[in-house]
Image (cartoon, coloured by chain):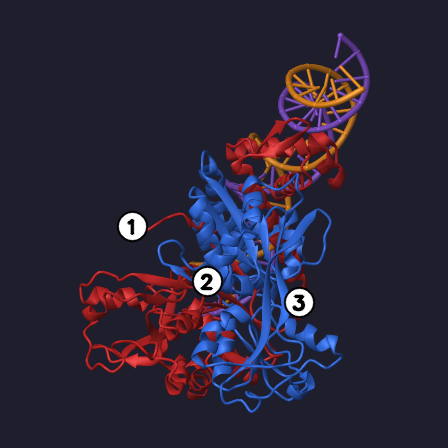
Chain colours: A red, B blue, C purple, D orange
DNA sequence: TGAGGTCATAACCATTGGCTTATAGTCCGC
DNA sequence: GCGGACTATAAGCCAATGGTTATGACCTCA
């Protein structure tokens, strides 16, 4: 499999025709045909079949078309970036968990880049399990998220303690109750956001089955649903201070809460981390950083950050899987 | 540039040594060295320099290491996917705007896959300008988002009308005012979420300068800040019904609002779109779909959807750019 | 049935890739 | 200044790539 072959196939998929692709690429038709043939042998898939006048992609061909276009695009980007890296400012590549992306990284980077004004930052959002490989492969310089699983060569320390509290809408039946046992909440609908949830751990620790949940695209969305009385939620305390003060959410006095948890910063080991990575690693533990994160959960003035554009990392999300219900 | 060369360089970057990389790859040291040499000539960058006992990556080398690991990973995924595509169920690849990801796609796909139970769905989040190229390159089958710029071969139609209203916290000074002119709100702090904002258009239509804004990682986050009295917001009406009913947000009676807007569905032209793409395209316009979207903005029962894992699409976000302020 | 598409394959050739072994250059520490 | 550890380069080999032209097989449509 070569870049040229993938480029050929991507063009075929795009044009819907081998000969048109050949014209577009400025080569003879057999050149494209043989590139496809090589991919066929390599991948063990027909990729497309002739049907009537034109062609139709097989299932494998559909996937290859997507991946080929992506890889070819990456190659272009790579060349451009390496070219532009000459004499450029520092680049800090961050990988964060969804929750950190929602509440932590924007104010944190806002504060950090105030001190390091000549710095570019690229941010990805990924699951915590991907942090170590991404650091080791140098696809990221710094990871911010929940406790990572230990990995050789990766050096993680907690940098921010936060508290988890159970919240619900103000009309919740247990709003005024004291010292609620967790099993009294087993029948509730628990609302969760995107990231990896402490909720499962909380129940597992007490040997209780994980309760029924409703999933939201964002933590803030889950909070909104909780406020509307749709269920209860294990929320990050400082992100619900406003709603609690206003009374749109109330804290339930559940035994075992507030529960402490930590966000971690991870980099490569001392010798291998880049200077910017080391600087951010030191910075996140400072009171200034903590202050910035806790003071304005989520928002920063415009003009310093564009919001990130997201791309899902897995391509085969099985939405048809159903729970017994 | 070949995959083997990139794999070699990625290993060098990872190991921090040419000879260790050679050992890891099971080849001789000159094999790796010459692969790097080929990349050097190809890309016109030193990639790394010898320093003391080991090596240090140049700026270009850092970027290459990141991109190389990414490409190599993609190649592996590609082979796996094509292999597994044999006899597999249909795959629907969706690309959506950030706002659609937050409020539309989860309930929509929940309803859609109820009818099409044997379907896999992959979702990416990207900016509207990327929709057309992604459809044309067959990196996505269906795009859902705000009005796309017209492109040859891409067929877009509006599928859902929604209303935009100006909301603020309940103690806002204009909470009870009637028929507010937009220029009376120019001094406000406007809160915006991630996506492309109607806000700029709204002001531009009246030839007013775009006001000062605060940016949030999610629409729901911006809503929370508005409820806390941090500013005003141009919100999607059906997503703030709950807060309005509870009184945690109030609608400001601004002239020109409620303002109508549309979400669009885009696919390739009739002949080239896949059957699933055509089915979803038809489905989104049905009352059932509309109902699902409006009824539960944001959330779905767990077990049907895992929340997506996000990766930023741009690698050179310049966070140090500052607006004159 | 035959003409005109379209894609696949064959035969051929020049170039590149990727590996080996051998050797030369460079830097560090003693 | 010299051994030792490292990377870079040279020379040689074989396989694979990427291109050509020529030809065959298949489908559609007049």
Expressed as whole percent of the image width and height from the top left, the position of residue A284 reads 44, 80
Expressed as whole percent of the image width and height from the top left, the position of residue A318 reads 42, 48
Q: Specify the label residue A86 is tagged with.
A: 3
Subunit under mark 2: B
| Label 3 vs label 1, nearer the camera | 1
| Left or right side of A128 for A21 | right
As drawn, B124 above or below B183 = above
As drawn, A82 above or below A162 = above
Expressed as whole percent of the image width and height from the top left, the position of residue A25 reads 73, 41
- Secondary structure of residue under mark 2: helix
Task: Give me the C-alpha separation between circle 3 and circle 1.
Answer: 56 Å
Q: Specify the label residue A324 is tagged with.
A: 1
Question: Are discs 3 and 2 located on one and the same chain?
Answer: no
Expressed as whole percent of the image width and height from the top left, the position of residue B297 reads 47, 65
- Secondary structure of residue under mark 1: loop
Query: 10 Å neighbourhood of mark 1: few (<14), some, or many (≥20)?
Result: few
Q: Is residue B191 visible?
A: yes
As drawn, A139 above or below B257 = above
Residue ID at (61%, 67%): B316
In this view of the protein, which residue sits in the foreground, A313 or A237?
A: A237
Task: Give me the C-alpha separation between circle 2 and circle 1.
Answer: 23 Å
What residue did someone put label 2 on?
B295
In this view of the protein, which residue sits in the foreground, B111 or B95?
A: B111
Subunit under mark 1: A
Task: Give me the C-alpha separation between circle 3 and circle 2.
Answer: 52 Å
| Left or right side of B27 for A182 | left
| Left or right side of A271 for A42 | right
- Secondary structure of residue under mark 3: loop
Q: Quadrant of residue A248?
A: bottom left
Query: 10 Å neighbourhood of mark 2: few (<14), some, or many (≥20)?
Result: few
């Amino acid at each position: 499999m070569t870049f040229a072959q993938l480029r050929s196939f991507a063009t075929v998929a795009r044009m819907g025709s081998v000969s048109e692709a050949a014209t577009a690429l400025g080569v003879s038709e057999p050149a494209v045909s043989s590139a496809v043939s090589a991919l066929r042998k390599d991948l063990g898939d027909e990729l497309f079949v002739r049907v009537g006048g034109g062609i139709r992609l097989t299932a494998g061909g559909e996937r290859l078309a997507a991946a080929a276009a992506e890889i070819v695009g990456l190659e272009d980007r790579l060349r451009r970036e390496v070219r532009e890296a000459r004499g450029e400012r520092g680049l800090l590549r961050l990988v964060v968990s969804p929750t950190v992306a929602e509440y932590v990284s924007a104010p944190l980077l806002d504060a950090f880049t105030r001190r390091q004004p000549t710095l570019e930052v690229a941010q990805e959002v990924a699951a915590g399990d991907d942090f170590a490989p991404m650091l080791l492969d140098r696809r990221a310089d710094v990871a911010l998220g929940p406790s990572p699983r230990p990995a050789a060569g990766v050096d993680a320390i907690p940098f921010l303690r936060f508290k988890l509290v159970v919240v619900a809408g103000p009309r919740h039946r247990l709003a005024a109750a004291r010292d609620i046992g967790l099993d009294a909440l087993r029948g509730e609908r628990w609302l969760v956001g995107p990231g990896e949830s402490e909720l499962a751990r909380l129940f597992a620790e007490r040997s209780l089955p994980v309760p029924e949940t409703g999933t939201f695209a964002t933590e803030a969305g889950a909070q909104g649903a909780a406020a509307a009385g749709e269920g209860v939620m294990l929320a990050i305390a400082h992100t619900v201070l406003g709603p609690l003060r206003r009374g749109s959410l109330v804290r339930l006095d559940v035994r075992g809460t507030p529960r402490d948890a930590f966000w971690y910063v991870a980099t490569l080991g001392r010798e291998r981390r880049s200077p910017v990575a080391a600087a951010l690693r030191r910075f996140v533990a400072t009171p200034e950083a903590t202050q910035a994160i806790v003071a304005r959960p989520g928002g920063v003035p415009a003009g310093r950050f564009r919001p990130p554009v997201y791309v899902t990392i897995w391509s085969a999300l099985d939405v048809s899987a159903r729970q017994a219900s």
